[in-house]
Image (tube, rainbow, N blue to C red):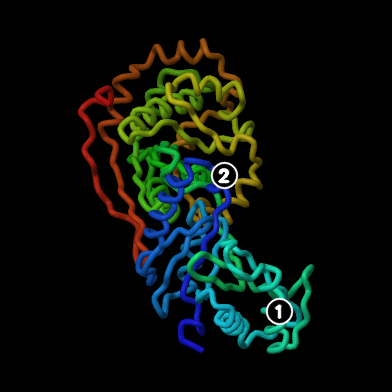
Amino acid sequence: MSEETKAPNAVVIHYHEIALKGRNRPLFIRRLVDNLQTATEGLGVEKITVPWGRIILSLSPGSPWEEMERRLSGVFGVANFSSARRCSRNIEEIEKTAAAAVEGKKISSFRISARRGDKSFPISSSEINRRLGRSIQDRTGARVDLEHPEFTLYVEVLKKEVLIYTEKYRGPGGLPVGISGVVASLLSGGIDSPVASYLMMKRGCTVHFIHFHSYPFVSKASWEKAEELVEDLTRFQFCSSLSLVPFGAIQREIVASAPPPLRVVLYRRFMVRIAEALAGREGAMALVTGESLGQVASQTLENLTTIQEAAHLPILRPLIGFDKEEIIQVARRIGTYPISLQPDEDCCKLFIPSNPSVAARREDVLRAERDLDLSRLIKCAFDQVERREFRFNAVGSNRLFQRTPFPESWKDL
């Protein structure tokens, strides 16, 4: 038995949703291949090929499977993936490779699942199942069980080769990041907004992050937490940027002139305006928030409508129908939950009235804003924005700290 037959030497990747894209499918596949190249850098991927309906990563000897599994499980667009052995289309070679795949395994029942991606192959799928089934039964003494097998051997016959594997690992599904354009996400230090950002990445969006903080009126805790969250989320989109916006001065002016029940809605309307200006700089086509209907005072239908009116861009709310437990479940699964639980001094908790309005009237909000110099306050915050860059780094930190100069006036965007 050759060395190539003994060890897995490829990864076979399947996608589901991309297969439904018709004539646009090649565009989606190219983006997924680019993302796979970035995600698997340094793991011994020698070549990526794209036969019909799947993507194959050819591996050099000694490629680390555990790290490969960890990275591929976070690449959007991947439905499932497997560590595979590849061999020629010779039936005897297929039998040898199948034997290597079960060598050393203690199994009581099994089945063979053969698929001919190339129908010109002279042996039918059912005949492949029978031949390999007999061979494995003779080697292991295990019985065939087509309904509830302990072990399944998968065989894919392609035009130039055959792939054989024994396990399927679940990918995140969705669409490849970067295929659906850019959005700007308002990232707090809480549980919800990182999950909302993740869900937009899963729909193929590249997410630019915007965090509002109240430093120097409070500590940098929320600022630092936002950086940690973006660093963690960068593993899903490989390249991220974060705009840190000082918001304490705006809050102080709102507190000095506006009725207390309206403060929260006014804060959010200012955030939306500033985020929209930053979104223009990033080429973003929409804003994203972690709002869930009815969760807090600012997230009633009346207040969401009043906040939305401050924006020209659409505001996407992927969590709008989620309850808190559902959001927490996703946060735990993607790994942001422990970071979100870290204590901080979020700007949304500064100067919060004891009884915020749950149904702020539009005319009252507009009257309160007439007493505020909107352009001056927005420009003041915008001129002090700091930007952070993050790049996927498999062996170290994803952070590349950088302050980027902004235009002299936010209206120049």
What is the spatial separation of the Cα atoms under label 2 and label 1, in whole angstroms?
33 Å
Front-lying residue, 177 or 322: 177
Q: Is residue 111 left or right of residue 232?
A: right
Taking the spot 34% from the left edge, 65% from the top edge, the residue there is 396
Query: Of 9 and 408, which appears nearest the observer?
Result: 9
Give the residue displayed 57% in from the left and 60% down from the top: 80
Residue 261, located in which quarter of the rendered image?
A: top right
SS of the residue at dot 2? helix
Residue drawn at x 45%, y 18% is 258
Q: What residue type is labelled 2?
A: Leu
Whether residue 374 is visible here, answered yes or no, is yes
Left or right: 351 in relation to 130? left
Tag of residue 70: none
Q: Which class describes the residues within 10 Å of circle 2: few (<14), some (14-19), or many (20+)? A: few
| Image: 307 above or below 348 | above
From the image, tell me which residue sits under label 1: 133
Secondary structure beneath dot 1 equals: helix
Q: Is residue 232 visible?
A: no
Which mark, residue 20? 2
x, y percent for residue 120: 57, 63
Q: What residue type is labelled 1?
A: Gly
